[in-house]
Amino acid sequence: MKDASELFGRWDETIIWSCLQGIMGEIYKNETGDAALAVLGDFAFCAGKPDEKLIKFKPEGCEQDFIIMVPQNDEWAGLIENCYEDKAKKVSRYAMKKEPDLFDVVKLNQVGSKLPEGYQYKMLEEHEYILCQKYRWANDFVSQFKDYDTYKKLGLGVVIFKDGELAAGASSYSRYRDGIEIEIDTRKDHRRKGLAYACGAKLILECLKRGLYPSWDAQNLWSVALAEKLGYHFSHEYTAYEIYGY
């Protein structure tokens, strides 16, 4: 892990930290030890000397045909494009700064206390874990935890119900030693009601109570705007590749 850590350097991504810390995910290195992948769920971060064999490597038992590859530099990016050609869709993602003391707890409590009529919070426990597995839009709230016992030990989440049905949620996509990577979504027919804002605030507060940092990486500009409403600051845009037919 020490050698792998040197390859990733100061890459400020919690998924890499999860892998290096041995908490979740895996580190794969090439035969010469000068290139590595940090793989967790749908993400693979590529570091070191670009290696075609490693780029094409698929872990044994992996059944998914989609992955998001994040290159460390332009050389890795070029290799991904050459290897996967039209299977690779180049996209932009948006990193938010990791600033442990930036959150306005008073504001977050105000946001978290306001839900539209008929909606209610629940912590993500065993019943909610099973529900999340059933719905594609909510699956990533729990998908990286092999069972509820693992989620209970490592994960943390808040969901919103209406009329007994799951409407929105914010949960840990992954866990590293000092915090979580946030996954947040709302069922399509419940959007534009402030539910993501409310349960995002609630989850941040739950993290702070436990001494965990709620890290936020944005897939799109909507996610950036929501993060900034919750108190985060934008860091930088970066390139990733969505690989279909992995």
Image: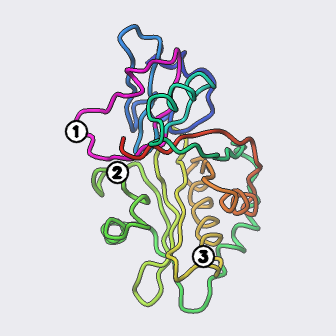
Along the line of sight, the residue nearer the viewer: 163 or 64: 64
Disc 1 residue crowd, few under 14, some 14–19, many 20+, Cα 10 Å: few
Who comes first in sequence, dot 1 or dot 3? 1
The range drawn in magenta is: 44-68
Residue 154 place in picture, x, y as percent? 41, 48
Which amino acid does the dot numbered 1 rest on? Gly
**How far separated are the C-alphas under marks 1 and 3?**
37 Å
Magenta stretch encompasses residue 50: yes
Picture quadrant of residue 27: top left
> Which residue is under mark 3?
195
Q: Which mark is residue 130?
A: none
Above/below status of 111 relative to 225: below
Foreground disc of the pair 2, 1: 1
Label 3 environment density (alpha carbons within 10 Å; few <14, some 14–19, many ≥20)? many
Q: How is the image coloured?
A: rainbow
- Residue behind mark 2: 145
Marks 2 and 3, Cα distance to the nearest angstrom? 24 Å
Amino acid type, label 2 = Phe
First in sequence: mark 2 vs mark 1: 1
Question: Is 92 on the left or on the right of 233, as rendered?
Answer: left
- Classify residue 23 by image quadrant: top left
> Which disc, if any, is residue 61?
1
* Residue 107 rendering spot, x and y as whole percentages: 76, 68
- The residue under the point 44% across, 67% down is 137
The residue sitting at 60% across, 20% down in the picture is: 9
Side (left or right) of 208 relative to 107:
left
